[in-house]
Image (cartoon, rainbow, N blue to C red):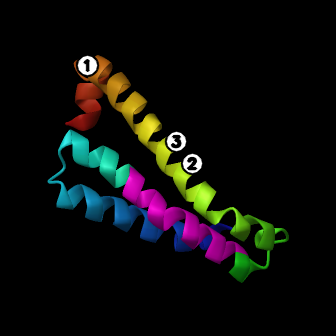
Amino acid sequence: PGPAKLLLAIPIGLSFDFFAYLGKYRKVSLYLAEAGMQLVNVPIAIGLFVWLGLPGTDQLIKLLPLAVILFIVEYAIGGFIGLKIYNRLKDKRVIMQLTG
């Protein structure tokens, strides 16, 4: 449901900002912030699933360590690919207008 997404999105966004701030928003710190964000994302998501009483959550809890590792790797790769795409497009007029 919509309001439950806020309970997930706010701590995830704040954790990303926290880790990026610690790295002074350098490119490398963005990768680390993505990974750090997942350390918060998975446990909060599972906690939300438990709170909402979703079926199958008990089986998901057993996979928590694997899920954290997989999400960290997945998001680090996604962040790397996204940064590569951005670096190719950053000099385009549309991107320059969007970023100010």
**Residue 21 appears left or right of 81:** left
Q: Is residue 94 visible?
A: yes
Residue 92 placement (x, y as % from top left): 27, 17
* SS at mark 1 in the image: helix
Q: Report the disc number at residue 74.
A: 3
Q: Report the disc number at residue 70.
A: 2
> What's the CA distance linking mark 3 and mark 2?
6 Å
Amino acid residing under circle 3: Glu
Front position among marks 1 and 2: 2
Q: Is residue 82 above or below residue 35?
A: above
Give yes or no for residue 39 being in the magenta stretch. yes
> What's the CA distance linking mark 3 and mark 1?
30 Å
Q: Is residue 36 above or below residue 11?
A: above
- Residue plotted at (29% across, 34% down): 98
Magenta stretch: dominant SS?
helix
Residue extending furthest bottom? 51
* SS at mark 2 in the image: helix
Residue 62 placement (x, y as % from top left): 72, 68
